[in-house]
């Protein structure tokens, strides 16, 4: 009996339960009926494996040794995972430091943009004030032109020409 047959059965078990998320937070919400249903499904999947069926039928499957083999493989995989994590830790630290630098740069950029926005708001107010002054001056110029025209016409009527 090889361990790969058990792995295939285990992989199939994960496929069966893929529609039910299994997280640590969900484990406290599992009812006895759900647990019984999962166990039945796992047993059915385990027993549907032909190599496991033949090992069980001829009695060559030693569950104790199978369990210890699985536990030793899990321990080996756990050690490998920890070693990979330790190996990646410096790179993760570098990435974290780079992210902190980027965060501080972005915070500075945000502060600068907020200052720029405030400056633009001030300039917008200044532009509105200048436009209002420009309109006022344009009205005054128009009024003076009209007054000048009216005065010119009045003077033309009132002033006696020198040849008279």
Image (cartoon, grey):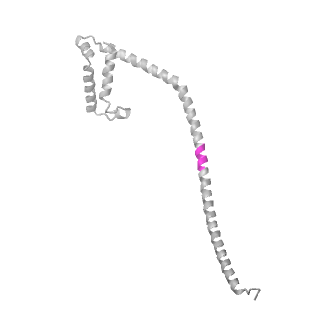
Task: Say above or below: 121 vs 54.
Answer: below
The residue lying at 66 percent from left, 72 percent from top is 141
Q: Quadrant of the N terminus?
A: top left
The residue lying at 64 percent from left, 73 percent from top is 142
Task: Say above or below: 112 vs 151.
Answer: above
Instruction: Describe residue 7's horizontal placement relative to residue 116 as left or right.
Output: left
The residues colored magenta run: 108-114
Residue 164 quadrant: bottom right
> Viewer-proximal residue, 146 or 16?
146
Q: Is the magenta stretch mostly helix, strand or loop?
A: helix
> Viewer-proximal residue, 124 or 48?
124
For the view shown, which residue lies furthest in the bottom direction? 164
Task: Say above or below: 155 vs 6.
Answer: below
At which x and y percent is residue 100? 57, 36
The residue lying at 35 percent from left, 34 percent from top is 26
The residue lying at 65 percent from left, 69 percent from top is 137
For the view shown, which residue lies furthest in the left direction? 57
Instruction: Describe residue 151's horizontal placement relative to residue 57 as left or right.
Output: right
At which x and y percent is residue 80? 46, 19
Task: Say above or below: 108 vs 97.
Answer: below
At which x and y percent is residue 31? 28, 34
At which x and y percent is residue 89? 53, 26
Instruction: Describe residue 58's horizontal placement relative to residue 24 as left or right.
Output: left
For the view shown, which residue lies furthest in the front direction? 163
Q: Does the magenta stretch include residue 66?
A: no
Q: How many labels does the image show?
A: 0
> Viewer-proximal residue, 144 or 89?
144
């Amino acid at each position: 009996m090889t361990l790969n047959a058990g792995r295939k059965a285990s992989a199939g078990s994960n496929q069966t339960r893929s529609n039910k998320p299994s997280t640590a937070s969900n484990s406290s919400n599992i009812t006895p009926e759900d647990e019984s249903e999962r166990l039945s499904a796992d047993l059915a999947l385990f027993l549907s494996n032909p190599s496991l069926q033949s090992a069980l039928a001829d009695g060559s499957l030693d569950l104790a040794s199978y369990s210890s083999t699985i536990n030793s493989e899990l321990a080996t995989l756990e050690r490998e995972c920890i070693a990979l994590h330790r190996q990646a830790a410096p790179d993760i630290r570098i990435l974290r430091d780079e992210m902190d630098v980027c965060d501080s740069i972005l915070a500075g950029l945000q502060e600068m943009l907020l200052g720029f926005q405030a400056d633009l708001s001030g300039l917008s107010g200044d532009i509105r004030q200048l436009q209002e002054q420009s309109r006022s001056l344009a009205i005054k110029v128009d009024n003076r032109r009209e007054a000048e025209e009216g005065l010119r016409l009045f003077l033309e009527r009132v002033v006696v020409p020198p040849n008279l």
